[in-house]
Amino acid sequence: MRLGQAVKKDSTYRAQPAPSAFPVPQEGERPVIYADRVGEYYVERKSDEHRKNHGLYLTPVPAADFMARWIKVSGPKLRVLDPAAGAGILCCAAIEALVSRDSMPNIIELVVHEVDRDLIAPLQAVIDYLVDWCRSRGVKVAVQVEATDFIIAHAETLRSLGGLFPYRSVAEDFDIVIANPPYFKISKADPRASAASTVVHGQPNIYALFMAVSAVLLRENGDFVFITPRSFTSGPYFRQFRNVFFDMIRPTEVHVFGSRRDAFSRDEVLQENVIVSGTRYNLRRWDKTDAPFVISSSRGVRDIGESDRREIPLNTALDLDSTNKILRLPICEGDDDVLALVDSWPESLRSFGLDISTGPVVAFRATEFIDKEGKVPDSHVPLLWMNHVHAMQATWPLNEHKPEYIKRSGTEALLLPNRNYVVMRRFSAKEEARRLTAAPYIATEFATPKVGFENHLNYIHRPRGTLADDEAWGLAALYNSRLLDTWFRAVNGNTQVSATELRAMRLPPHQTIITLGQCVKQLADPMEGLDRLVMELIAHPELEEAVVGQH
């Protein structure tokens, strides 16, 4: 089948046996189970590169069923969109859920998009079986399979988001959109990135484009159900997207996976995922921003049926009047208390006369200057990477595989004065116990006039001076505490520790930071007693069980 050709199916279509290359349906088998078997068969025969390039990660059946249960719209005729169908697992789950209702629809119109041309035949086999399965239960299903790039096909929809009438659909509206979109970054030169300039900037992750277009194509009060990375919920990178998206979609429920491995464990995906459910609104602002908002959570897919659930007012999770529009996800009452405490703090890095910046040494651009050996301070100075920074300790040199020295000559613009800093990892590795890893960098411990920080580090500094030793120790202790880790997990949806978010974060009084630094310096093992000190000096005693007891 040529890319771009559409295949239309209606309820008069008689399903043909699946090609011998695919698994065939078993008698009485649910369509979603058949779709899962076909999908696994297909994925097993594709290279890792093919799967990565197409963002091909199958939705686990329990997650698909969980998402389908969130569909609320009803009526005699419903239109369903799956913009990234893959093997059809999600659209099968959605239609099964609709057909299993007491007040099931009479007619369902299903439109599915799939850009991977090799997947069209397997997808078609699944759709054929789904049509027959529904017919046997008295529901007519008309299907349109679009072998097209969903974003390119709706490029004008994205461009319209910046116009006077940004939310008019280019096609008949859908009642339901359900999707597991691909997750990968696209280059600035990609035509999809150009079309999405009103939604995202730089090198956008394509899943955000799927969310934006799908939101536009929903009718008012239609259901939006997506499983995506959590990264869109916070951070400067997705700020523009959140402004557009939350003008269209009022979130009603979010499911948080506690493990970054378990949601797509069979595909070995390390990603922090959420399931987002919302309702389409045509107004720029909704009324009733204090409407109920449900946050559910499980470790992964296997225990998704026993999810913990809690309801909070939406405006406590999402402040539409803020410039960042961060979607906070406190999964328990203890998280609420921590958010309230941190939000009440009076200070910030800026009020302390401090700033946070990203390490200026980009390794691949400085290969001619970085070495595995060097003479400090004559010809070289230390170069610190993420592996030099551990909780409350910056250690150099390590004498490991990475080059740890950088030449002094020719790198003047990349080097920093040897002053006191707080150095922080910009990324949390895999399933680390804590997301924030910070260490005091004390100048007197490094016999060098300059120092290099690699680009995967952030560093806190005083632009016209230096941090006092106690300031550096106190700030590092606070950032390494379980209190701040709890706050960060509720607020930040990214594996990256954003300098922008840390710059905006509230801090306790300056003298409290100093006192914390003075006390933590005296500990034989700073991490061993750090949380106790933080709770005594900064937090309310009743928070201890909520913060420390839950880890």
Image (cartoon, helix red, strand yellow):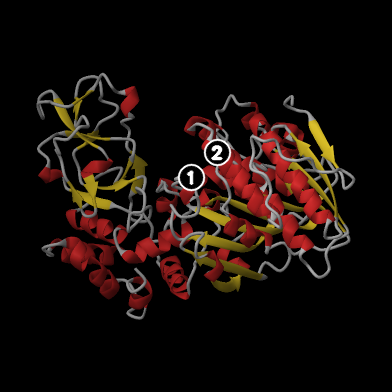
* Image height of 259 relative to 335, above or below: above
**Residue identified by numbered label 1:** 267
Query: Disc 2 or 1, which lies upstream in sequence?
Result: 2
Q: Is residue 35 above or below residue 55?
A: below
Q: Quadrant of the C terminus?
A: bottom left
Position of residue 488 measured from the top left corner of the image (x, y, whole percent): 41, 59
Residue at the location (75% across, 38% down)?
157
**Do the CB atoms of the residues marked 2 and 1 lie less than 8 Å apart?**
yes
Could you tell me the amino acid type at mark 1?
Asp
379 and 191: which one is in front?
191
Q: Is residue 147 left or right of residue 348?
A: right
Say what secondary structure mark 2 lies in.
helix
Judging from the image, what secondary structure is the residue with disc 1 in?
helix
Query: In the rendered image, which quarter is residue 282 located in?
Result: bottom right
Q: Position of residue 525 (x, y in %)?
A: 14, 62
Q: Residue at x 12, y 64 (%)?
A: 522
Residue type for callout 2: Val
| Spatial separation of the CA atoms under disc 2 and disc 1 | 9 Å
Q: Nearer the viewer, residue 433 or 100?
A: 100
Q: Nearer the viewer, residue 39 or 328?
A: 39
Q: Percent x, y for residue 312?
A: 58, 72
Where is mark 2, residue-wise?
A: 43
Q: Is residue 448 above or below residue 544?
A: above
